[in-house]
Amino acid sequence: MTANPAIPVQTEPATAEPPTGADVVVLVGNPRPGSRSRTLAEAATEALVAGLARSATVLHGVQVLELATLVGVSFDAEPVRGSAEVADPFEVVRSARLLIVATPTYKGSYTGLLKIFLDQFGHRGLAGVVAVPVTIAASDAHLRAVTNSLTDLLAELGATLPVEPLAVLEGQLAAGSDLVAAWVDRQVGLVGGALAGLRVRA
């Protein structure tokens, strides 16, 4: 695998203007575009946003940041360049109210691509953002490992993590829609409460 060396670099956040991006951002850390990680994350996002709307928590706009496309990743011999037209992906993430972070398991943890991106944020760089990890793994042990490590990383960055992550084994993906629906039923109230709490404090 080769990656475009021009990794996006964090810039200082603007202070003069309020955020204008989508309320909901789906950050996909799989190095393969159009992955099962993205499919699961988008399904969870759609169901969660719909559930929040039914409970009077309305979120405006959903933006997907697929790092494989944003950075430029290839499994062939030739390097590639990022093709997504996002001027400042860090500001997109930073200004989100709800951040869905999806990753498969690579070497027992989240992907290096996701780590490179999130490492660009400073201390408590995601403070004020409600974050939900979405993870996929082949075994229970790997699923626990990737879920715990991603949750710890997001907490270290200051994100609010009000619910249990959506953690799915590869063998369960065929029943993904049912798993997502059951997960949303359990978690939607907690997510809505966290969003409301952060808005009050802001």
Image: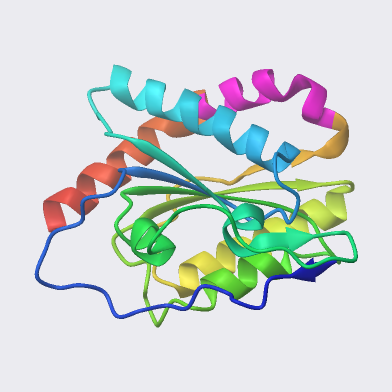
Q: Quadrant of residue 6?
A: bottom right
* 175 sits to left or right of 62: right
* Point 40% across, 82% down: residue: 122
Quadrant containing the C terminus in the rendered view:
bottom left
Q: Quadrant of residue 124?
A: bottom left
Quadrant containing the N terminus in the rendered view:
bottom right
Verify whether residue 182 appears in magenta.
yes
Counting every numbered tag in the picture gives 0
Residue at the outermost left position: 16
User: 15 above or below 23?
Assistant: below
- Measured as percent of width and height from the top left, residue 77 is found at 90, 66
**From which residue to which does the magenta span run?**
172-184
- Measured as percent of width and height from the top left, residue 174 is found at 81, 22
* Point 28% across, 44% down: residue: 195
User: 63 above or below 67?
Assistant: above
* Point 79% across, 29% down: residue: 173
- Residue toward you, 93 or 137: 93
Verify whether residue 152 appears in magenta.
no
* 174 sits to left or right of 80: right
- Residue toward you, 69 or 10: 69
* Point 38% across, 64% down: residue: 88
User: 185 above or below 169?
Assistant: above
